[in-house]
Amino acid sequence: MLPMNQTKLFLFGQPRLEKAGQPADVHGRKVLALAAYLAVTGIIHNRDHLATLLWSEHDQSGARANLRRELSQLNRLWGPDVLTATRESIGLAADGDLWIDVVRFQGCITAGQAHDHGASAICAECQPLLEEAAALYQADFLAGFSLPDCPEFEEWQLFQRESLRQGLAAVLERLAAGLADAEAALGYARRWLTLDTLHEPAHQAVMRGYARAGQQAASLRQYERCGEILHAELGVAPGESTQQLAAAIRQGAFRPSAPVRATSALPVPIEPAVRRHDLPSQTTPFIGRQYEVADLTRLLAEPEVHLVTILAPGGMGKTRLSLAVAERQIKRFRDGVFFVPLAPLSSPDDIVTTIAEQLDFSFGGSTPPKQQLLDYFRERQILLVLDNFEHLLEGAPLVTDLLRAAPDLKVLATSREKLNLSGETTYLLAGLHFPTWESLEDLLEYDAIRLFIGSARRVRPDFTLQPQDFDDLARICRLTAGMPLAIVLAAGWLDLLSLAQVAAEIQRGLDILETEQRDVPERQRSMRATFSYSWERLSEVERQVFMKLAVCRGGFSLEAAEVVAGADLRTLRRLAGKSLVQIVSDGRYAVHELLRQYSAEKLRQSAAADTVRQAHSRYYLAFLAARDADIKGRRQQAGLQEIRADFENIRQAWLWALEERQADAFTRAMLDCLTNFADMNFSALEAHNLLSQTISAFQPTAEQSPQPLWEQAVVRQQEINYILIQPFDYAQIKVILERARARGDTHEMLHCLLVLSNHFFGMRDYGNPANDEALALAHVLGDPFYIARAFNN
């Protein structure tokens, strides 16, 4: 299994990026195209080539600017050690910590070919490699992804897709021919045939597979089907070798193979006439989650994994996902797949009898019921789905007892809290993928959008998405952070409200996210009820910490949680185990946005609200000031990454200090760091807005002298105006410069002169003298960063 904190790039199917097991927010399609191209080619590329590949309609300057923007996003998503870059070239670092499914697929094939035996043979070493390659290929390369304005990229994409399909065909051919397990070999042969139904060798492999599995009639039906397809498509009969194979099968030349226990990472389905299951039918379609279904399918197929818990807050779609996975397992478990709803139970003592009822198993005799249940499972191959386990955790040891008694039993549990069993594999479930980039082409590819549209049409059958709706619909999905229950509840209001009104109501609070439908469980009729159920299960310490964490936006570090919310590692771990806090990457945590809204309501109702907000503001403003030296020195990339990760917290901290008119909360280091971050990180607009609000908050009256903070904010805003190509107030900067001279403020003089030098660049009478003086002052201050700035001007 892959490390949970590793960055992963999936290119089979719709491209996606994961960090620490969670989908990463990727802004735009071309950054995904760039990631795919760099990952698959695996070489260093000239920047001009990449710019032309993806922005051929732009001039070279504009194309390279777009490339820089997307590379900046890749650096943020992948971390500083994955890309290797110079002024003229870019590529992936040889030792970068990035897992790529296509690269792993190709590596498995290469390793599986490096043995001395014949091409059709399979040994114990190459079998798992080939099986892993087959499992990795979930869909065609970049399936459903296109860039119509990039013909060169699309040509490369098509070539790669065909090349990888050929690689898969070769893998499936070897597995079909070389596996000792007849049923497994048949499964791979049938998959091979789906790649090209006109390929006779694949038809032959399926015929052999059925014959080896003792299904002579099915084998001969496959021969007839082959003939029908070839006649309909090509007007020809099967070739001589296919006819000879059919004759041999009729004569009984193939003896059934004795199947062996599959070592496959992904067992192939077997096909008895009937499979037992009690999975409830669903009244609404299952949308999205194809990657989660594939991940859970792979986990359940691993021989050493017997218990998987889908862990998520209420409303995230755990039950529907477990049913979707279970439906795909029906043919894989000889003795059936059974769904056991635990939500109605009030005592762990009822679990044994409830499982027995779902299995139609009756107790008898004097043997204790639990022992009878263990004996029932002992020789059976069953998948047991235990849904909503969180309120019965005292009964969790029963699961361990069942798994110890029955080696072929697998358990898929859903819970808001970990079962905390030694053999448990937890699968953290996040929201559906939602848009951060609005266009029709992209919008309809997001699962959250498709779920909303489907739910809306059940309320308003005439609902159609119009271009003017895009922003509001994307906003709803962002506000709900892709939580399925919240999306369905929001869509339920479209008979009364517009999309814009629904979005505005969600922004105000959770009250709109409710339904009156009678067939919905009471605790799922509103998001407030769903979250209250989890809140009631918390200890007082956990409630206090969770409530105070509501002030953090966009994630937080352990240190921030300790300072702002009084948390410790043990409490955070317990909250994570109850799916209220997510571990999103090394050292960082997050709370789902709707859960954060709920806990924010609790915080507003408490006496601690102002104290917590002040602690948050002080911490993050000091955090920003401390990064000033970093981004001007050797820790520049690390410092920029840290600011990026917490910029929303910094923004909230800044705004609260402005709201409270706390001029002493701001230091020159904070303003310098914000300005330099804006310049280095393409975040000029956000910084400009904060500085504008600072200027407004501390604007002097005609009778007042301006505060130093106001002057510093004006100068930094003028620096950013240069980046944004906005108007320059020469007179104002001259006044502030002269005030700085009068009080001997060398640092502020330097900033004013750099502003003048930037705006008068190339004008000898104005720009050169200002820059010369700025360079001299930078030397006086002994600041290498500003010496370089002035020198570069």
Image (cartoon, rainbow, N blue to C red):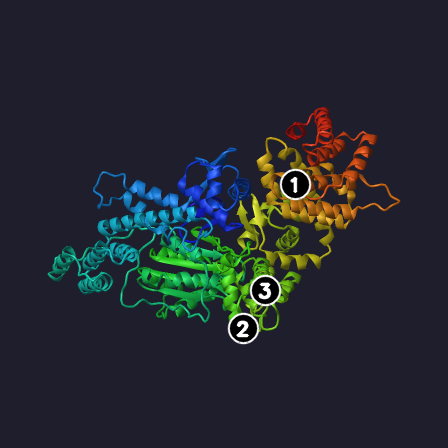
- In the displayed image of the protein, which residue is found farthest to the right? 703
Which residue has dot 1 on it? 723
Q: Residues within 10 Å of mark 1 (few under 14, many from 20)?
A: some
Q: Quadrant of residue 748?
A: top right
The residue shown at (23%, 63%) is 229
Side of 340 where 165 appears, left or right:
left
Which residue has dot 2 on it? 459
Question: Of residues 574 and 14, which is closer to you in this image?
Answer: 14
Name which of mark 2 and mark 1 comes first in the sequence.
2
The residue shown at (30%, 49%) is 166
Judged from the image, the secondary structure of the residue bearing numbered disc 1 is helix
Q: Residues within 10 Å of mark 2 (few under 14, many from 20)?
A: some
Side of 572 where 697 appears, left or right:
right
Which residue has dot 3 on it? 527
Would residue 538 be seen by someone viewing this image from the given angle?
no
Question: Of residues 248 and 774, which is closer to you in this image?
Answer: 774
The residue shown at (25%, 50%) is 173
Between the C-alphas of marks 2 and 1, the distance is: 48 Å
- In the displayed image of the protein, which residue is found farthest to the bottom? 518
Q: Amino acid at mark 1?
A: Ile
Name which of mark 3 and mark 1 comes first in the sequence.
3
Side of 650 where 490 appears, left or right:
left
